[in-house]
């Protein structure tokens, strides 16, 4: 059972979480990023029940994160592919991969996956970068700046981390 949505909440984080839906939605998106596209493969990878997988695939399609494409008829069979909006969530998933590898809560010998450049094979990491200078920024130095869409609750919520402007 999915929890209540975040409709009406003025928050970009809540918007992404709402689009993913829940932990099953995030794991399905993980599998799509890893190249799985078929229903049976998604089911095998996650261990999710048929009912939950069907529900989450429909929800992710409604959110515009994936598209269903027919690859066979008689019987009709479909595969699931990421949309541009779905590919945008890759940054979130890569950040979770990076943090999960660092935490190693399962006590593994090493990370199960690494992020690498598809051309060079060199490892990559998710990092904060100054847009103007290209310099990497330490996360503890990051502040937020209120945008045009900020409502009163957003202003209150972020008061401790808002960069003061002149």
Image: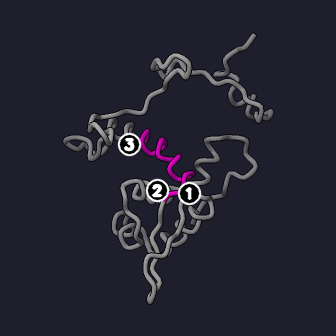
The residue mark sitting in front, 1 or 2, is 1
Magenta-drawn stretch contains 1: no
Q: Above or below — where is 121 with respect to 2?
A: above
Circle 1 sits on which residue? 65
Looking at the figure, which quarter contains the N terminus?
bottom right
Circle 3 sits on which residue? 97
Please indicate whether residue 18 sits to the left or right of residue 38 in the image: right
Please indicate whether residue 132 sits to the left or right of residue 160 in the image: left
- Whether residues under marks 1 and 2 lie with C-beta atoms below 8 angstroms apart, the answer is yes
Please indicate whether residue 64 sits to the left or right of residue 54 in the image: right
Q: Nearer the viewer, residue 83 or 14?
A: 83
Q: Above or below — where is 146 with respect to 118?
A: above
Question: Which residues are the magenta region?
Answer: 82-96
Residue 29 image label: 2
Calculate the distance from the C-alpha at mark 3 to the C-alpha at mark 1: 19 Å
Calculate the distance from the C-alpha at mark 1 to the C-alpha at mark 2: 8 Å
């Amino acid at each position: 059972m999915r929890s209540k949505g975040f409709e009406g909440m003025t928050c970009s984080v809540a918007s992404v979480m709402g689009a993913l839906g829940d932990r099953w939605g995030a794991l399905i998106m993980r599998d799509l990023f890893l190249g799985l596209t078929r229903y049976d493969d998604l089911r095998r990878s996650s261990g999710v029940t048929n009912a939950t997988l069907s529900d989450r695939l429909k929800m992710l399609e409604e959110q515009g994160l994936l598209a269903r494409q027919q690859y066979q008829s008689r019987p009709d069979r479909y595969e699931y592919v990421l949309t541009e909006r779905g590919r945008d969530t890759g940054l979130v998933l890569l950040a979770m991969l990076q943090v999960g590898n660092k935490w190693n809560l399962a006590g593994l010998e090493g990370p199960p996956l690494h992020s690498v450049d598809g051309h060079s094979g060199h490892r990559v990491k998710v990092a904060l970068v100054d847009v103007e200078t290209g310099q990497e920024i330490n996360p503890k130095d990051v502040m937020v700046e209120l945008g045009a869409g900020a409502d009163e609750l957003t202003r209150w919520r972020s008061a401790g981390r808002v960069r003061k402007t002149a």
